[in-house]
């Protein structure tokens, strides 16, 4: 769909991101409308975990075009959101994956709030000590520490292979992406990736490290990514298939 003839009032001023809400099947979701100079058409994306929507638009697009675009895709949104898993709350008695292995959450009151993993007759368990109210936060903190340990080792391995250094490594709880690489060489990762199997964690790190050399998703980037992680295609598919379920888990 060409948009060059649309010269009416622009959708966005500065900054080029508009925040609002959009109702889908009775659910009110945050909506980000992002202007991108390289966009040639409107694109719609559901954030991981179904927690929000993002519409990317070409510069200078008329305001009404977004409304009509969302209206045309309302059925698609309802169908896709119906498949998004519920947002389970971490609590004793449920299982949470650690490096792809489900662990039963067990709460044991104790003076110190520690977390440890064990494997017994009933299978892998995650034992959390301390005040029950702080259990979700303690699990999140544990995953952050594990992410820092594993990912920094993987970053060192992959950066050595590409001959580039990371300026910084940061850990976030992002809802729209698993990792990122800035033009100055700073890497960011979602600590939730520690719930994925080790090969998927390795793929994510390889993907972002590859951006240190190729700041794009062109053929040379994917060639380098597969050199760093031969399981790139399989792990990429796993993350696409299972990522929403990991993003849906609540640690609040």
Image: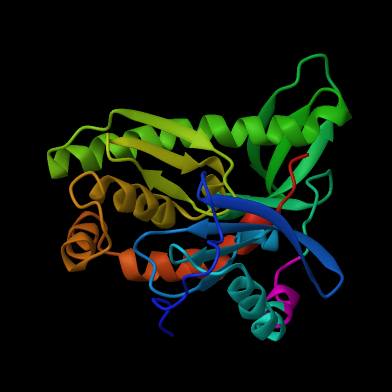
Q: How is the image coloured?
A: rainbow
Q: Residue at coordinates 49% horizontally, 73% vertically from top-left?
A: 42
Q: Nearer the viewer, residue 123 or 127?
A: 127
Q: Residue at coordinates 79% horizontally, 40% vertically from top-left?
A: 106
Magenta segment boundaries in residue numbering: 78-85
In the image as oriented, which residue stretches furthest toward the front?
A: 8
Expressed as whole percent of the image width and height from the top left, the position of residue 25 reads 83, 75
Q: Residue at coordinates 43% horizontally, 62% vertically from top-left?
A: 59
- Indicate whether 40 appears above or below 190: below
Q: Nearer the viewer, residue 122 or 96?
A: 96
- Indicate whether 73 appears above or below 187: below
| Quarter the C terminus occupies | top right
Instruction: Give the quadrant of residue 74.
Output: bottom right
15 left or right, relative to 116: left
Expressed as whole percent of the image width and height from the top left, the position of residue 206 reads 30, 50
Expressed as whole percent of the image width and height from the top left, the position of residue 195 reads 57, 50
Instruction: Give the quadrant of residue 230.
Output: bottom left
- Indicate whether 76 appears above or below 245: below
Instruction: Give the quadrant of residue 143.
Output: top right
- Indicate whether 94 appears above or below 233: above
Q: Residue at coordinates 65% horizontally, 80% vertically from top-left?
A: 68
Would residue 215 be counted in the magenta stretch?
no
């Amino acid at each position: 769909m060409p948009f060059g003839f649309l010269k009416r009032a622009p959708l966005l001023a500065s900054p080029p991101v508009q925040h609002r809400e959009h109702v889908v099947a009775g659910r009110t979701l945050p909506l980000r409308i992002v202007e991108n100079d390289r966009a040639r058409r409107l694109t719609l994306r559901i954030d991981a975990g179904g927690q929000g929507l993002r519409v990317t638009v070409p510069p200078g697009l008329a305001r009404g075009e977004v409304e009509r675009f969302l209206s045309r895709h309302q059925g698609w949104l309802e169908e896709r959101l119906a498949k998004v898993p519920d947002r389970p709350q971490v609590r004793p008695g449920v299982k949470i994956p650690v490096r792809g292995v489900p662990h039963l959450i067990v709460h044991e009151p104790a003076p110190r709030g520690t977390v440890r993993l064990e494997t017994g007759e009933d299978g892998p368990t995650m034992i959390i000590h301390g005040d029950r109210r702080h259990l979700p936060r303690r699990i999140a903190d544990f995953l952050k520490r594990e992410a820092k340990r594993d990912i920094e080792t993987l970053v060192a391995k992959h950066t050595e292979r590409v001959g580039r250094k990371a300026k910084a490594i940061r850990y976030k709880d992002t809802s729209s992406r698993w990792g990122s690489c800035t033009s100055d060489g700073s890497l960011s990762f979602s600590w939730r990736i520690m719930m994925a199997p080790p090969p998927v964690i390795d793929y994510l790190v390889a993907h972002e490290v590859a951006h240190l050399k190729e700041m794009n998703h062109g053929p040379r980037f994917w060639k380098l990514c597969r050199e760093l992680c031969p399981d790139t295609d399989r792990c990429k598919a796993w993350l696409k298939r299972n990522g929403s379920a990991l993003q849906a888990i609540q640690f609040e």
